[in-house]
Image: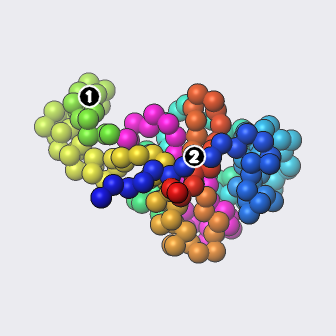
């Protein structure tokens, strides 16, 4: 059984921000990043942004607007305590999960040889240990489709934190734009 890919919905103007997100930190994120809206001044973060560690993604947001966590593939399954801390102690009530195009965690298994060679060359690892390391963690971190993964991760975290607004987004590196990720039709 195959998993249907969610729809990516471009947010090209303020009218494209769904009514349910307008006036929320998620709506503000879209307006700041996609349209360069003049930022308000923030004393404390209103949002937690969870995104991939890829260096090509730079968000245009004001200071003190958001906590930002990065993890490969925007996979926070092993970092949930940090999310909980930002919600419990930081007081954030909105979570934007951002996947992106050309993610290195998609099809990770096909990069096994490169991973091992790089860990040996750059990290000084023994080839056997590098292979074992890859084989142990690849199943945990590999994703098949970035949009589908971020949609399922948003569903998982919404169930875990029912009073937090969790929204999956997709960063298009070429355009530098955030799109909405919607359920497949």
Q: Which residue is mark 2?
A: 8
User: Mark 1 to mark 2: distance in Å?
Assistant: 31 Å
- The segment highlighted magenta reads 83-106
- Tell me if 109 is positioned left or right of 90 in this view: left
Q: Which residue is mark 1?
A: 114
Q: Is residue 185 above or below residue 35?
A: below
Q: Where residue 15 sits in the image (x, y, percent)?
A: 80, 48
- Tell me if 172 is positioned left or right of 29 in this view: left
Residue neighbourhood size for the residue with mark 1, other residues' Cα within 10 Å, grouped as few (<14), some (14–19), many (≥20): few
Q: Which mark is residue 86?
A: none
Q: Where residue 121 sits in the image (x, y, percent)?
A: 26, 24
Q: Residue at the location (28% across, 33% down)?
A: 111
Nearest to the observer: residue 35 or residue 10 = 10
Q: Residue at the location (70% across, 44% down)?
A: 11
Task: Please identify the quadrant where the N terminus is shown.
Answer: bottom left
Q: Is residue 91 magenta?
A: yes
Mark 1 residue element: helix
Q: Is residue 51 visible?
A: no
């Amino acid at each position: 059984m195959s998993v249907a890919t969610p729809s990516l919905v471009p947010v090209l103007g303020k009218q494209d921000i769904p009514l349910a997100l307008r006036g929320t930190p998620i709506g503000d994120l879209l307006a700041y990043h996609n349209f360069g809206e003049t930022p308000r001044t923030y004393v404390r973060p209103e949002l937690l942004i969870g995104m991939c560690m890829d260096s090509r993604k730079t968000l245009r947001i004001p200071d003190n607007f958001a906590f930002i966590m990065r993890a490969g593939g925007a996979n926070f399954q092993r970092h949930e305590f940090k999310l909980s801390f930002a919600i419990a102690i930081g007081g954030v009530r909105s979570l934007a999960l951002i996947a992106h195009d050309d993610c290195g965690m998609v099809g990770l298994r096909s990069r096994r040889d490169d991973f091992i060679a790089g860990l040996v060359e750059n990290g000084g690892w023994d080839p056997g240990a590098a292979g074992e390391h890859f084989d142990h963690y690849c199943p945990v971190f590999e994703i098949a489709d970035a949009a589908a993964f971020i949609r399922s991760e948003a569903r998982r975290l919404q169930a875990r934190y029912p009073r937090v607004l969790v929204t999956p987004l997709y960063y298009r590196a070429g355009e530098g734009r955030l799109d909405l990720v919607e359920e497949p039709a």
